[in-house]
Amino acid sequence: MENLLQPARARHVLQITASGPLEGLAGELRAAFPALAFENPENRLLRIEADGPVPVGPLVRFLEERGVEVVEARRLRPCLEDVFAEITGLGAETLRQDTSKSGGRA
């Protein structure tokens, strides 16, 4: 188990929750923070991945300067489902949807 989790633990993941929509900021975020990977899985959520620590303060300031109220910023630790998705190439969100459709049975 430890060997499986090790590569995922090397990544740093931060999730930011905003009070309103985060649409339309992807290009600006990528230009301002080129070393980070951004994903907007839901309207008010922003997931940031990096090889090193994610600069929380500058990201929050950047968003607030554009009128986005940040409600929460938290570091995410990889779960076994994320590791499986990374190894198999299947998206974690796809796995979650399939699990919910089957009533929680894999």
Image (cartoon, grey):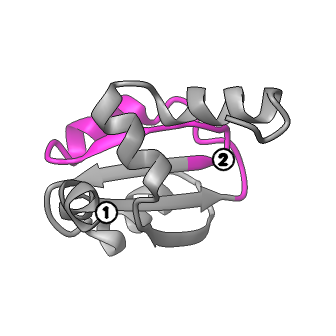
| Relative horizontal placement of residue 38, taking residue 91 as reference (left or right) | left
Give the magenta-colored segment's residue range.
19-45
Q: Tell which of 57 and 99 is nearer to you.
A: 99
Disc nearest the viewer among 1 and 2: 1
Location of mark 1 (residue): 1
Location of mark 2 (residue): 44
Q: Tell which of 66 and 21 is nearer to you.
A: 21
Residue 34 colored magenta? yes
Q: Quadrant of the C terminus?
A: top right
Give the number of the disc on residue 75. none
Image: 29 above or below 14: above
CA–CA distance between discs 1 and 2? 33 Å
- Percent coordinates x, y for residue 78 in the rendering: 40, 60
- Percent coordinates x, y for residue 44 in the rendering: 66, 47
Residue 29 colored magenta? yes
- SS under mark 2: loop
Residue type, label 1:
Met
Residue type, label 2:
Arg
Q: Tell which of 90 and 29 is nearer to you.
A: 90
Q: Would you identify the image quadrant in which residue 29 lies?
A: top left
Image: 100 above or below 57: above
